[in-house]
């Protein structure tokens, strides 16, 4: 149920565009590499990139739980996670292979390592995909906590957990639609960006676009080049963006006056017209800004509303 064929672009990564047919073919290709292992758990240890998505869905296609690992983790942290959950397979990349090699030293159970940078693209297009049936209480994801109150804990999220959240924002309240284009920015080992920037938009038939980095110029370029309609971020990201905008507004008496007027009128149509240049800076198509991961400062949300943006705050 998680993926199906749409006649459109599924993933944009710089100049590389991957349509749904190619996405499904690559998922099938990745799954063929591991289906004979009969693995209960598959770990992913790599930076944000299309191969992360291929690896992820290929595990579900083989009815395996996915263990997500922060690609910036030190070897000791990776080793702890691998010892704790003992995945049979781990997908990695050239960027993470050295850290992984160190983590595998003296590991109790050695997983099969697949470096996605050593794989060839799918040679045969197979655009049919059929995910297995899952019981509601079957574990689909294991996501590790930060460990701030002791050793990291592997949080087991079930099929029911995932699908309840997925349907809530696609079927029950259509925040995600086939017409949307989502910015992929936050690291995918966290549940919020994983569901919010990968699983939900692709389930709805939308397009996702990877930002090359967290640098401001990369984010802006991705927003503009792909006419992004949905941005998902944490409160700190929105606070930084808001500060930059307010600093510029406060330097201009005219802009300060217009901001005060817009705040009083409280009309999205008026605000979008007055602050058209701000919206153009974001690509001109942003429909919603979605915030989660922590409580959003009401003052930040209020200022974005004054600028004509619709901000949605999630809690999970």
Image (cartoon, rainbow, N blue to C red):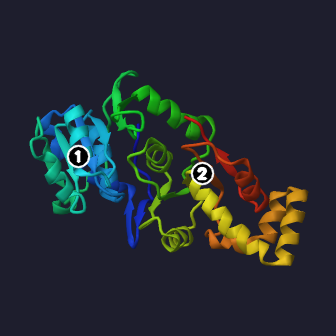
Which residue is tagged 2?
235
Q: Viewer-nearest of labels 1 and 2?
A: 1
Q: Eyeballing the image, is 250 above or below 200? A: below
Rendered location of residue 275, percent (x, y) = 77, 70
Q: Is residue 137 left or right of residue 274?
A: left
Q: Can residue 179 be spotted in the picture?
A: no
Q: Eyeballing the image, is 312 above or below 165? A: below
| Circle 1 residues within 10 Å: few <14, some 14–19, many ≥20 | some
Rendered location of residue 316, percent (x, y) = 54, 34
The residue lying at 86 percent from left, 77 percent from top is 254
Precedes in sequence: disc 1 or disc 2 = 1
Of 57 and 80, the residue lying toward us: 80
* Element marked by disc 2: helix
Rendered location of residue 253, percent (x, y) = 85, 77
> Real-space Cα distance between discs 1 and 2?
30 Å
Of 77 and 21, the residue lying toward us: 77
Residue 237 marker? none
Of 189 and 272, the residue lying toward us: 189
Which residue is tagged 1?
76
Q: Is residue 73 left or right of residue 11?
A: left
The residue lying at 79 percent from left, 59 percent from top is 306
Rendered location of residue 262, percent (x, y) = 86, 63
Q: Is residue 35 left or right of residue 197?
A: left
* Element marked by disc 1: helix
Q: Can residue 268 be spotted in the picture?
A: yes
């Amino acid at each position: 149920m998680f993926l199906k064929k749409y006649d459109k672009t599924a993933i944009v990564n710089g100049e590389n565009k991957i349509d749904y047919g190619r996405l499904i073919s690559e998922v099938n290709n990745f799954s063929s590499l591991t289906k004979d292992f009969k693995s209960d758990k598959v770990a992913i240890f790599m930076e944000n990139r299309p191969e992360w998505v291929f690896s992820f869905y290929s595990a579900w296609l083989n009815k395996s739980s996915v263990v997500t690992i922060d690609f910036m983790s030190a070897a000791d942290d990776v080793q702890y996670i691998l010892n704790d959950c003992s995945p049979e397979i781990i997908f990695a990349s050239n960027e993470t292979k050295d850290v992984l090699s160190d983590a595998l030293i003296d590991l109790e159970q050695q997983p099969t390592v697949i470096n996605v940078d050593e794989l060839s693209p799918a040679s045969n297009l197979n655009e049919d995909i059929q995910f297995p049936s899952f019981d509601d209480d079957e574990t689909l994801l294991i996501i590790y906590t930060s460990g701030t109150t002791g050793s990291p804990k592997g949080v087991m999220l079930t099929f029911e957990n995932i699908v309840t959240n997925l349907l809530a924002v696609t079927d029950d309240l259509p925040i995600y639609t086939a017409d949307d284009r989502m910015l992929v920015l936050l690291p995918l080992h966290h549940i919020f960006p994983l569901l919010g920037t990968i699983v939900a938009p692709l389930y709805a038939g939308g397009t996702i676009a990877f930002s090359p980095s967290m640098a401001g110029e990369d984010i802006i370029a991705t927003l503009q080049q792909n006419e992004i309609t949905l941005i998902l971020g944490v409160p700190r990201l929105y606070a930084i963006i808001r500060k930059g905008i307010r600093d510029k507004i406060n330097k201009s008496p005219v802009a300060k006056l217009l901001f005060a007027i817009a705040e009083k009128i409280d009309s999205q149509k008026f605000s979008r017209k007055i602050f058209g240049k701000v919206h153009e800076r974001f690509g001109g198509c942003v429909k919603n800004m979605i915030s989660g991961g922590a409580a959003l400062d009401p003052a930040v949300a209020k200022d974005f509303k004054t600028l004509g943006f619709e901000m949605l705050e999630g809690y999970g």
